């Protein structure tokens, strides 16, 4: 059973999705939950089925005190690197919250401070604290929806299925069709990178 990080009332949990993808944005969510929030299904989005994530998305949106989601596009990822782009996405999500948090809990072991708000990094926080788990679900579902829209523009990469991750099918399509404006040029898109023309 996940818990609330109890020391601070207006804490916000934040997490990202899509860091390891070859295409598409990195997406982050920030979620503030009421202290009495409970949901036995909620967990790290990676441990949930797609159907459970889709079910939880409106539950989190309706029952949270405040939530926000932000994308950082591939050009920016290439410019500042994926780690900094992940932090930027989290900052953009936090900026959109209706309630200013007085504490931030972050999934992982690194974070760039957001203004003067204190924070704590928590390894595997998305499987320990509800607000981070809720953020992981929103980041994943919103990013998946985004990639499904991009799939309509470039169906040959099958992003509606692989969501931009480096599957064998995705890499085979890159080799056959080349890259799009949604691919991350700073990533190793193919094992034989030098044969790929930008």
Image (spheres, helix red, strand yellow):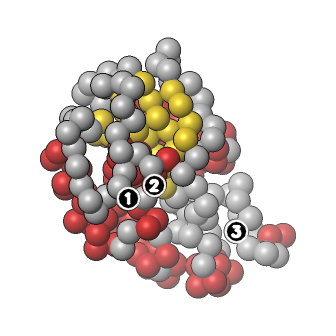
State which mark lies toward you, 3 or 2.
Answer: 2
Residue tagged 3: 189
Q: Mark 3, residues whose alpha carbon is within 10 Å: few (<14), some, or many (≥20)?
A: many
Q: Mark 1, residues whose alpha carbon is within 10 Å: few (<14), some, or many (≥20)?
A: many
Is residue 165 shown above or below 84? below
Q: Are marks 1 and 2 in contact (CB under 8 Å)?
A: yes
81 sits to left or right of 88: right
- Residue 90: image x %, image y %? 47, 38
How many marks can you see? 3
How far apart in space, not on screen, are marks 3 and 2 (Cα)? Answer: 30 Å
Residue closer to the observer: 36 or 80: 36
Asked where in the image residue 140 lies, by quadrant, the reply is bottom left
Dot 3: what SS?
loop
State which mark lies toward you, 1 or 3.
Answer: 1
Dot 2: what SS?
helix
Residue at the image point whose x is 24% and y is 55% from the top: 39
- Residue 117: image x %, image y %? 46, 19
- Residue 194: image x %, image y %? 84, 70
Dot 1: what SS?
loop
Point out the image quarter for the N terminus.
bottom left
From this viewpoint, is residue 131 visible? yes
Q: Name the mark on residue 43.
A: 1
4 sits to left or right of 188: left
Q: Earlier in the sequence, mark 3 or mark 2?
A: 2
- Residue 163: image x %, image y %? 47, 70
Is residue 33 shown above or below 43? above
Residue tagged 2: 127
Q: Earlier in the sequence, mark 1 or mark 3?
A: 1
Residue at the image point whose x is 43% and y is 58% from the top: 44
Is residue 9 shown above or below 197? above
How far apart in space, not on screen, are marks 1 and 3 (Cα)? Answer: 31 Å
Residue at the image point whose x is 30% and y is 36% from the top: 32
């Amino acid at each position: 059973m996940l818990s609330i990080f109890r020391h601070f009332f207006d804490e916000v949990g934040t997490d990202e999705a899509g860091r390891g993808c070859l295409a598409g944005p990195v997406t982050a969510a920030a979620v503030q939950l009421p202290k009495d929030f409970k949901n036995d299904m909620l967990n790290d989005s990676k441990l949930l089925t797609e159907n459970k994530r889709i079910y939880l998305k409106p539950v989190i949106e309706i029952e949270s005190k405040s939530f926000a989601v932000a994308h950082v596009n591939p050009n920016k990822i290439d410019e500042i690197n994926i780690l900094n782009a992940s932090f930027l996405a989290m900052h953009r999500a936090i900026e959109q919250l209706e309630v200013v948090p007085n504490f931030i809990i972050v999934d992982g072991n690194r974070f760039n401070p957001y203004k003067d708000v204190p924070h704590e990094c928590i390894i595997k926080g998305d499987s320990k604290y509800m607000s981070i788990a809720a953020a992981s679900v929103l980041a994943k579902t919103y990013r998946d929806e985004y990639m499904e829209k991009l799939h309509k523009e470039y169906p040959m990469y099958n992003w509606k299925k692989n969501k931009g991750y480096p599957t064998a099918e995705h890499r085979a399509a890159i080799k056959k069709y080349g890259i799009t404006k949604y691919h991350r040029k700073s990533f190793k898109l193919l094992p034989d990178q030098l044969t790929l023309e930008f």
